[in-house]
Amino acid sequence: MEEGEAALNVALEQLKIAAEKLNLDPGIHEMLKHPKRSLIVSLTIKMDNGELGNFIGCRVQHNDARGPFKGGIRYHPNVTLDEVTALAMWMTWKCAVVDIPYGGAKGGICCNPKEMSTGELERLTRRYTSLILDIIGPHRDVPAPDIYTDAQTMAWIMDTYSQFKGYSVPECVTGKPLSIGGSEGREEATSLGVVICAREAAKHIGLKFKGAAVAIQGYGTVGWNAAKIARDMGCKIVAVSDSAGGIYCPDGLNPVDIYEHKSKTGSVVNYKGCKNITNEDLLTTGCDILIPAALENQITKANADKIRARIVVEGANGPISLEADKILYEKGILLIPDVLANSGGVTASYFEWVQNLTREHWMLQEVNRRLENKMGKAFSAVQKIAKQEESDMRTAALMLGVGRVSEAIKTLGLWP
Ligand code: NAD
């Protein structure tokens, strides 16, 4: 089974578990199994060598009962419609869990951004925006960055959208650079939320957060910022990795130095004084807190039994398979699920959208205060359900998310 299909199977199985627990109306369950709308687009651009480049992209809008669709755009060679559909569904639950007025969506283009020039990526982004233009917009569907897309990508989307409209529309996209209406703290928000969850989880199991040993898979936006924030809060970062491999340093490493090393060499590996390890080693390394912050399906039944962390916080979306979930639970490892753990990113995106709509700009302290408040409330709400239901945190979070969406669907009623 290819990765995208596996991710969608996981998402559907999770929905089924929540539906059974909530005694959900079968009609609503069926409705939520499918996205409201999926658009596949064919993208042809001029490559730098003068040839034409052909790519396939999509935008999947899962559910908008609680507000406009919201979700990132991913550029990756393995992007498939199934994967993007799973990610869109997770966005629906995530926005509901953290209680922001959005539905869920996701977009993707099957391409290899590492082999493309900035000019090619700009043309691809603008072409993609023009083809999904009719279904996005500040009150319809608001894109954001995801794997291998960033603030610059969002700037190109905003400009393309604004050129078509004839006026500037910063609120059509979030995760923008500060100079064109981005929010303070957006870049680090997902990671701040991840680390807040790790801190709350540590409190819950009586683990001393200060000095806790942390291992992080993936050293992109989420991974590297999580390393920096966790270290600032007193944790010891003992291992990190990226697509080329990982490094281990039991005495703790300095995330900023590693970031500079990666910027120069392209990877975290071969950092002086650290031992090179594989991604598989990283996941099973001895640590207190493990943060998968790369791709889906990284902890499966093949390696779940070897995980030695006491807490696993899902920085990435869908990094743990269903079988692995069970194994971790039976081993007594506390798992903080993606729909809760990485919801800080979409929450800060929501703050950015509110600032754009009201033409305001909040200070960093204000953004972080609101983020801490939203994450804290969501964590407590999920924990309360887990206690009542005697369930793991994933089941509890899904019950909260799916329950809120189902409530909105029932309240709206059906048209016609
Ligand atoms: P990114 O592109 O900035 O970073 C991805 C990192 O993963 C890179 O360091 C890359 O080298 C590494 N990687 C790729 N393949 C790998 C492999 N096989 N093993 C180990 N590392 C590998 O992406 P990001 O924005 O940091 O997103 C990471 C994850 O977090 C994704 O699942 C994404 O959906 C999720 N997420 C991101 C945000 C956000 O605000 N950026 C919000 C919520 C969830």
Image (spheres, rainbow, N blue to C red):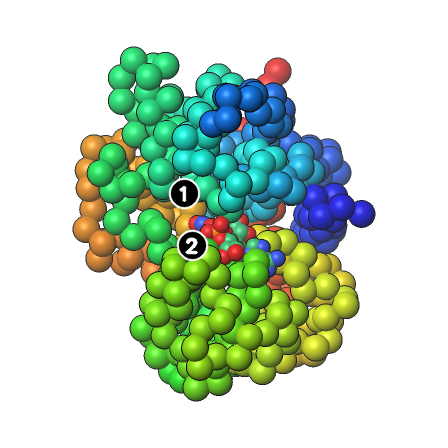
Residue name at image x 71 percent, y 71 percent: 304
Instruction: Mark 1 and mark 2 in contact? Answer it, CB < 8 Å.
Output: yes
Residue 274, placed above or below residue 10:
below
Quarter of the figure that contains the C terminus? top right
Q: Measured from the top left, where is residue 187 in percent x and y?
A: 35, 51
Q: Quadrant of residue 153?
A: top left
Residue 221 marker: 2
Q: Is residue 53 above or below residue 289?
A: above
Q: Is residue 280 left or right of residue 244?
A: right
Cβ of mark 2 under 8 Å from ligand 1: the answer is yes
**Left or right of 158: which side holds 359?**
left
Q: Amino acid at mark 2?
A: Thr
Earlier in the chain: of badge 1 and badge 2, it is 1
Along the line of sight, the residue nearer the viewer: 292 or 270:
270
Mark 1 residue CB less than 8 A from any atom of ligand 1: yes
Q: Is residue 410 visible?
A: no
Front one among 341 and 285:
285
Please indicate, yes or no, whether residue 232 appears anywhere in the rendered image: yes
Q: Is residue 346 above or below residue 388?
A: above
Q: Residue under label 1, please give it.
A: 150
How many numbered marks have been drawn onto this rendered protein structure? 2
> Within 10 Å of the Cα at label 2, are there few (<14), some (14-19), or many (20+) other Cα atoms?
many
Rendering coords of residue 61 (x, y %): 57, 31
**Residue drawn at point x = 54 percent, y = 69 percent:** 246
Foreground of the two, 113 or 187: 113
